[in-house]
Amino acid sequence: MFTGIITGVGRIAAVHDLGSSLPDGQRQADPRYGRRVTVEVPAGYLDDVGPGDSIALNGACMTVTQLDTANQSFSVDISAESLDKTAGLTEPGPVNLEKALRASDRLGGHIVAGHVDGIGRVSLFSPVGESWELRILAPAALGKYLAYKGSITVNGVSLTVNSVTDGANGTEVSINLIPHTVENTALRTLETGRRVNLEIDLIARYVERMLGAVVRPQKAST
């Protein structure tokens, strides 16, 4: 579990095809195979991390498979299925990081599972006064989970929805980003048209399931 509070900004430094037997420098991307992704991190970030630990990359929960503390980097293996359901995990550049939640940690954001529910697209990212307005067009299937002042995770960052607009092409949400969020996460690199990972509020998911469940009468025992 996570909270959507980013604990570091890393950088995807290398991506290799897991299904290729060619040397690293000759490997070619193949959609049938997963990828091994190497992420460089800030100094000291891996001091309490070991192989098998969970770290969320842009909101997607991944398992650390290799550690290179000398070079301040770690690697994860991402399956073809995960790659198909996420965005931005095979492109060199900055990435939001969050270590798994400890039972004693503060829940500073909201309950986040690290499971990407859909891919949205940035429709606006523009400064407004001292802050920034971020608008994202989410898939129509996620629209029922998005509400005014509700929570949403964008590339791993816990954010509050300021407005919701349903349309023919999906549901657009507007979010206000304070300067601290822009300065301390990889969201600062967003631009119009960029694809982003979205996770809906976990509680909203269960509420929808409970309200939509069909209750079948039980047969009387004899």
Image (tube, helix red, strand yellow):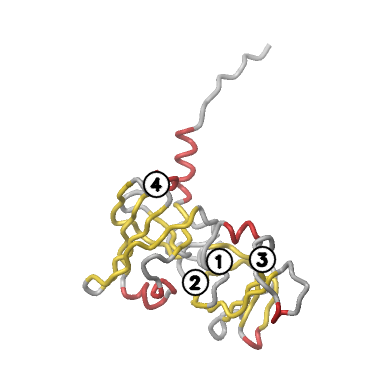
Residue 143: assigned label: 4
Question: Spatial distance from mark 4 to mark 1, Cα to Cα?
Answer: 24 Å
Per the image, the residue denoted by label 2 is 96
What element does badge 1 sit on? Answer: strand
Q: Are marks 4 and 3 in contact (CB under 8 Å)?
A: no
Q: Position of residue 21 (x, y in %)?
A: 78, 72
What element does badge 4 sit on? Answer: helix
Per the image, the residue denoted by label 1 is 56
Q: Position of residue 117 (x, y in %)?
A: 50, 53
**Which is more foreground, mark 4 or mark 1?**
4
Q: Look at label 1 and name its amino acid.
A: Ala
What element does badge 2 sit on? Answer: strand
User: Which of marks 4 and 2 precedes in the sequence?
Assistant: 2
Q: Are marks 1 and 2 in contact (CB under 8 Å)?
A: yes
User: Which of marks 2 and 1 precedes in the sequence?
Assistant: 1
**Which is more foreground, mark 4 or mark 3?**
3
Which of the two residues, 175 or 108, is positioned nearer the viewer here? 175
User: Which of marks 1 and 4 precedes in the sequence?
Assistant: 1
What element does badge 3 sit on? Answer: loop
- Apparent side of residue 76 relative to residue 163 in the rendered image (left or right): right
- Quadrant for residue 136, please give it: bottom left
Q: Look at label 4 and name its amino acid.
A: Gly
Q: Look at label 3 and name its amino acid.
A: Asp
User: Which of marks 3 and 2 precedes in the sequence?
Assistant: 3
* Above or below: residue 126 compared with residue 136: below
Q: Look at label 2 and name its amino acid.
A: Asn
Residue 30: assigned label: 3
